[in-house]
Amino acid sequence: MRFPILTAQEAAQHIKNGFSVAFSGFTASGTPKDVTVALAEIAKKEHEAGREFKINMFTGASTNDFVDGELARANAVNMRTPYQSCPDMRKAANAHTAHYFDLHLSEIAQKLRYGTFGKIDVAILEVQSISDDGDIVLGTGVGNAPTFATMAEKIIIELNEAINPKIFGLHDIYIPLDPPCRREIPIYKASDRAGVPTLKVDPAKVIGVVKTNHPDGGAPFSPADQTTMMIADNVCDFLTTELKAGRIPSTFLPLQSGVGNVANAVLAGLDANPHIPAFDMYTEVIQDSVLNLIKSGKCRFASTCSMTFSKDTMKEFFENIDKFHDKVLIRPGEISNNPEVVRRLGVITMNTALEADIFGNINSTHVTGTKMMNGIGGSGDFTRNAYISIFSCPSVAKGGLISAIVPMVSHLDHSEHSVDILITEQGVADLRGKDPVQRAEVVIENCAHPDYRPLLREYLKMGRGGQTPHTLKAALAFHETFLAEGNMKATDFSKFC
């Protein structure tokens, strides 16, 4: 190997206070594991000596505790974008000790290339292999690694010896041209390959190689419970109804799914439903349930940015790679989430909400409108460009003390103009072709928990006229009551008018 072998500590010494640092991967998959831990130790020592040490962080999406956790706990982050899901980074973002900038995942790479956020000083890339002339085979998540590698002044390689060499050929590395030279992205079905299997980097940029050995894969999602299974049944019933009505082609359409327990249950429901035909997936993350779909033949092909499998499922995937190799492609985030491709393919999108209001607006990021959870992620990329956009969530939380269906969302991520279908365990609200009052009526009757329907009907009747009959003084009464009394059911609208 032509590149020097470094310890994580030696590599981290090349990163200085104020640097902009970019990281490969998407979710925990494909993200660095060792250099960031050493970097956090440098930050701690600098702070103990009374010196400032913070970096600006650019990623593909969320990372792992080796990255977001270690750096947040070391107070080593000045700015962070575009998505996070680590409790320590969330705490820093809400306290403004790290300036978290939430952004649609498809946009970060091109905004960097356009110069919006300045230069990238160092990119840290986890790889399966690197040749002497700079051909890289990436790991189980790509994220924005191609753009980061192109833009970075220097590159640190983490050569993860735990990545199975049979991963070669699963990647589709493609960077679109920038305006005014941009052409269409040549993907016309989910399985089309637009680019090449390796990432080419300039060898002169590579500071050195840090050898690591960290298997990717995390804990499995919780088993489906009664609520998530009911949501899954409602999603399947809606899709089969659309099929029978001819509003979805008989050959079906590609699906996108978010990540989490609800999404996992929905995908399992699709697998078990005999009325759902085999389909492709064009999505940003594939999880354990997608591998089950591939094994059963229900999913013919999965285009993704990351294989976010549990440890056991990751092991199963590579042990049976000959069966799966022609059924998966791992792409950069700006391709997996690209609005042009999503619209062209006619993707049916399925994402989760923290809360929805009776008029069809969605909050997917902020608890009670103020506390950031994770970020908007790729849900906006897919929702706005979907053939049919579906949002789902349980109707209540915290044992019924919180209603996920509220008079007005406390934070707006997806407006009524982008949301077609809302689904809870209570039922399905088809919002297409309805004015605001009609939407409110169907959301209350079909999606709200019975304990909250009287209150929501009362709010709708209070409306002060206009096309969307909000009563502004009472619009956030559910949230105000919860903050004061810990129970949205105690809401008395007369106190807010």
Image: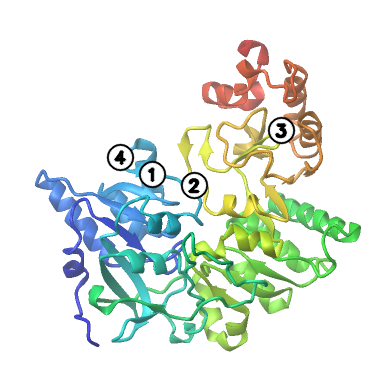
Identified by mark 4, the residue type is Thr
Name which residue type carries label 1.
Answer: Tyr
- The kind of secondary structure element at disc 4 is loop
Q: CB atoms at circles 1 and 3 under 8 Å apart?
A: no
Q: Which of the pair 461/197 is nearer the observer?
A: 197
Residue sitting nearer the eye, 161 or 226:
161
Q: In this image, 467 relative to 312: left or right? A: right
291 sits left or right of 445 in the view = left
Picture layout, residue 35 above or below residue 455: below
Seen from this angle, which residue lies furthest left? 49
395 versus 280 height, above or below:
above
Q: Is residue 18 above or below residue 497?
A: below
State how far apart marks 1 and 2 are (Cα): 9 Å
Judge the density around disc 2: few (<14), some (14-19), many (≥20) Cα neighbours within 10 Å: many
Q: Which residue is mark 1?
A: 100
Residue beneath disc 3: 359
